[in-house]
Amino acid sequence: MTTARRRPAPSQTQNASSKPPPRSPSPGQAPRTAPAPVPTGAGHHDPEPAPLQIGVHHDGSTTVLRLHGELDVATAAGLHRHIAVVLNEHDPHRLLLELSELTFTDSSGLAVMVWAHQSLDRRGRQLRLYHPHPRVLRILQVTGLHTRLHITESDPKVTLFRRHLGQHRATGSPDGARAGSPVAADVPPPAQ
């Protein structure tokens, strides 16, 4: 018959819920270390996400919104409001979202793109996603939205807008939208 070793009862001065002191390693064993922290988020290593900036350019029946930064739950409502203003004030035949500098989007950002597509489609208008960043394009492909949303790699309006931006940045003037229209906006986080 074997007998099991009994653990000594915790002393009255020791809290029963406290952890026992760490064991020292046996001879020949390496000391145990805590596991390395695992990065959280969808591959992000930035301590603070980049705010979303929106550049606007109106050219006749086309409006170009140039997105820079990250589109997520904290910035999606701001983009939604921005697009709604553009649709109500300018009613463009075509809205181009220039996405080459949009480095991330989550489901809330995708929902804004789908909403914009549906809103424009109901008006007989068109939404185009221009030159999405490879990470954003991958998200569009994984979700299947690349088959529903119009994605384009070349558009003369965007090329003109980029040239226009470059000229104004070189001279130090604003991003080049017409007077009275929003040029660039840092989308603030939602009010709490």
Image (spheres, rainbow, N blue to C red):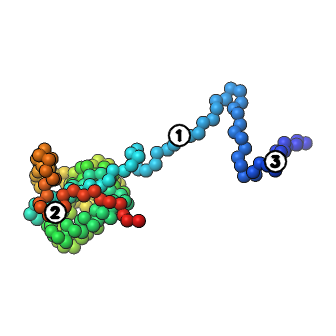
Viewer-side residue, 64 vs 118: 64
Which quadrant is home to the N terminus? top right
**Callout 2 crowding tier (Cα within 10 Å): few <14, some 14–19, many ≥20:** few
Q: Secondary structure at mark 2?
A: loop
Q: Where does the image place residue 5, in percent across and percent down from the top left? A: 84, 42
Query: How far apart are the two marked residues, 3 and 1, measured between alpha carbons?
Result: 34 Å
Identify the amino acid type marked 2: Ser
- As drawn, the residue found furthest toward the top would be 28
- Is residue 107 in view from this perspective? no
Say above or below: 100 vs 78. Answer: above
Residue lying at 71% horizontally and 41% vertically, measured from the top left: 21
- As drawn, the residue found furthest toward the bottom would be 122
Question: Counting residues from the N terminus, which is met first, the one under dot 2 or under dot 1?
Answer: 1
User: What label sits on residue 181 in the rendered view?
Assistant: 2
**Callout 1 crowding tier (Cα within 10 Å): few <14, some 14–19, many ≥20:** few
Identify the amino acid type marked 1: Ala
Question: Counting residues from the N terminus, which is met first, the one under dot 3 or under dot 1?
Answer: 3
The residue singled out by tag 1 in the image is 36
The residue singled out by tag 3 in the image is 11
Query: How far apart are the two marked residues, 2 and 1, measured between alpha carbons?
Result: 49 Å
Q: Where does the image place residue 77, in percent across and percent down from the top left? A: 32, 64
Residue lying at 35% horizontally and 57% vertically, measured from the top left: 72
Identify the amino acid type marked 3: Ser
Is 91 left, or right, of 192 in this rendering? left
User: What label sits on residue 124 in the rendered view?
Assistant: none
Say above or below: 161 vs 89. Answer: above
Residue lying at 24% horizontally and 69% vertically, measured from the top left: 84
Quadrant housing residue 179: bottom left
Residue lying at 35% horizontally and 60% vertically, measured from the top left: 189
Say above or below: 150 vs 11. Answer: below
Say above or below: 65 vs 172. Answer: below
Question: Counting residues from the N terminus, which is met first, the one under dot 2 or under dot 3?
Answer: 3
